């Protein structure tokens, strides 16, 4: 097969040409084999014919010798020796001539004997090799491409995280490298690659993960900057030591903000605008103690209850708080206050007046709703009464709610707000009897009893305590 340039051609095309060449080659071999077989057959026929003639000649000679023998012609010893030498020379010359003829041509076959020629039956089957590879397209290509370098993850112990909790403090970033490879494809499908070289172009950034070690935080399920609650009264100190200077006293249920955790026994917190250290044993979280937020809310409300508190601000209590406070009051024999708990709550929202103060005033003036004026005229406050004619001069209402609403508006407009204060219905406070927003200030113009404010405040404390 002639040498050809296969560059720029597909392997399948090359295999097709090989297949065509194989076919031509086999045809030539078939023709050559036939010629060889014909020649062998011809030689064999010639040898066979020669053998027959030789056999006939030998028979004739035998018969002739036999006749001669019968005639008993005597041969001398010298003549016999000459005949033997002549025979040896003739045989030697014949063999030499046959050897030369054999060397001269592979097609010459000895006429004195039969020759068997074996045809090679185990040649490589070029047809099968070409067919099995004709449909297989193997392609190799060398490329240089950018690849990622995976980043490492580094874990660090962290005392301000709950034990076992993990927090990623630095995100990892993959690096970059240029990789030169030789890729092998068979029929378009990737099979393997061999990396020739790698060159790093950008380092990776490791990912840093903080692993918590704090058993205290794990126990209360809290984190830095969370709100914690005191489970008992405690002293806020300047340093994390029992002998350190006192900064403030904090009562049970009050909340603080967790700032730092220098150890498992002490933590730094913020209480209002003050910072200091508290023992961890007196702190809990809303997650660990779900009732704490509600107890904290009530605590903050009740801590503001004092005789000097402002009455022109809502109490901060919810409707449920009011219903809880007025439910089953021992002295509320006719359930007047329990039935009107919602009314006291609603007027607080509408007029910005403390509803507990208003209810305490009604309890004091009506003796828990048992006075004649309260029973006959639905007037819990004795509103409009004069000392000389209390019953006759008092206002009469169709419902307790009507009287509660009117007194709330009067106190808001004339007693507890300074002049010009914006109040309900886009009105402003007239402040005709205003001397301040405390019980003692209202006492000066509202009641002739100098101890009136103290008596009313006792009812207020009693009602708040029911929370």
Image (cartoon, rainbow, N blue to C red):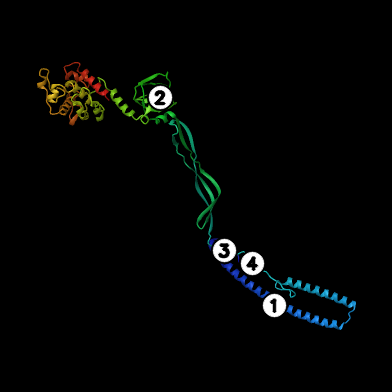
Q: Position of residue 305 (x, y in %)?
A: 27, 22
Q: Position of residue 6 (x, y in %)?
A: 56, 62
Residue situated in front as seen by the camera: 419 or 314: 314
Q: Which mark is residue 45?
A: 1
Tell which circle, 3 or 4, labels the residue nearer the N-terminal end.
4
Q: Secondary structure at mark 1?
A: helix
Given this view, does label 2 or label 1 mark the residue nearer the observer? 1
Tell which circle, 2 or 1, labels the residue nearer the N-terminal end.
1
Q: Secondary structure at mark 2?
A: helix
Mark 3 Cα within 10 Å, few/some/many (few <14, many 20+)?
A: some
Mark 4 Cα within 10 Å, few/some/many (few <14, many 20+)?
A: few
Q: Which residue is mark 3?
A: 130
Residue 417 seen in render: no
Separation of residues labelled 2 and 1 (CA atoms):
123 Å
Tell which circle, 1 or 3, labels the residue nearer the N-terminal end.
1
Separation of residues labelled 1 and 3 (CA atoms):
40 Å
Separation of residues labelled 3 and 4 (CA atoms):
19 Å
Separation of residues labelled 4 and 2 (CA atoms):
98 Å
How many labels were placed on the picture?
Answer: 4
Residue 304 found in image quarter: top left
Residue situated in front as seen by the camera: 467 or 27: 467
Residue 458 found in image quarter: top left
Given this view, does label 1 or label 3 mark the residue nearer the observer? 1
Tell which circle, 4 or 2, labels the residue nearer the N-terminal end.
4
Q: Which residue is mark 2?
A: 281
Q: Which mark is residue 121?
A: 4
- Looking at the image, do the residues carrying marks 3 and 2 touch, with CB atoms under 8 Å apart? no
Separation of residues labelled 4 and 1 (CA atoms):
25 Å
Residue 401 seen in render: yes
Separation of residues labelled 3 and 2 (CA atoms):
86 Å
């Amino acid at each position: 097969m002639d040498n050809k340039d296969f560059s720029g051609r597909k392997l399948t095309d090359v295999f097709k040409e090989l297949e065509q060449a194989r076919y031509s080659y086999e045809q030539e071999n078939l023709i050559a084999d036939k010629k060889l077989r014909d020649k062998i057959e011809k030689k064999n026929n010639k040898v066979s014919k020669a053998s027959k003639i030789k056999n006939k000649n030998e028979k004739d000679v035998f018969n002739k010798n036999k006749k001669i023998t019968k005639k008993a012609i005597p041969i001398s010893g010298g003549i016999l020796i000459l005949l033997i030498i002549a025979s040896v020379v003739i045989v030697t010359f014949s063999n030499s001539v046959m050897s030369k003829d054999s060397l001269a041509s592979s097609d010459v076959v000895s006429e004195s004997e039969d020759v068997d020629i074996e045809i090679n039956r185990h040649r490589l089957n070029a047809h099968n090799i070409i067919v099995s590879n004709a449909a297989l397209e193997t392609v190799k290509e060398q490329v240089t491409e950018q690849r990622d370098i995976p980043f490492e993850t580094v874990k660090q112990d962290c005392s301000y995280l709950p034990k076992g909790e993990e927090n990623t403090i630095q995100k990892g970033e993959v690096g970059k490298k240029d990789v030169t490879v030789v890729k092998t494809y068979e029929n378009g499908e990737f099979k393997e690659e061999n990396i020739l070289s790698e060159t790093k172009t950008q380092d990776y950034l490791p990912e840093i993960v903080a692993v918590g070690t704090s058993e205290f935080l794990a126990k209360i399920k809290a984190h830095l900057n969370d709100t914690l609650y005191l489970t008992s009264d405690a002293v806020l100190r300047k340093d994390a030591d029992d002998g350190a200077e006192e900064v403030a006293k904090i009562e049970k249920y009050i909340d603080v903000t967790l700032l730092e955790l220098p150890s498992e026994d002490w933590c730094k917190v913020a209480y209002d605008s003050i910072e200091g250290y508290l023992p961890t044993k007196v702190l809990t979280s809303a997650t660990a103690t779900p009732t704490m937020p509600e107890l904290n809310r009530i605590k903050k409300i009740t801590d503001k209850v004092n005789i000097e508190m402002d009455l022109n601000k809502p109490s901060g209590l919810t409707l449920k708080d009011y219903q809880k406070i007025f439910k089953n009051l021992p002295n509320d024999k006719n359930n007047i206050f329990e039935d009107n708990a919602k009314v006291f709550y609603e007027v607080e929202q509408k007029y910005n007046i403390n509803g507990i103060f208003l209810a305490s005033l009604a309890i004091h003036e009506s003796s828990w709703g048992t006075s004649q004026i309260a029973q006959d005229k639905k007037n819990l406050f004795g509103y409009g009464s004069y000392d000389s004619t209390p019953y006759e001069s008092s206002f009469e209402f169709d419902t307790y709610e009507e009287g509660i609403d009117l007194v709330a508006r009067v106190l808001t407009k004339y007693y507890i707000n300074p002049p010009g204060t914006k109040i309900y219905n886009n009105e402003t406070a007239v402040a005709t009897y205003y001397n301040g927003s405390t019980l003692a200030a209202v006492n000066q113009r509202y009641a002739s009893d100098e101890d009136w404010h103290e008596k009313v405040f006792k009812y207020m404390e009693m009602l708040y305590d029911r929370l």
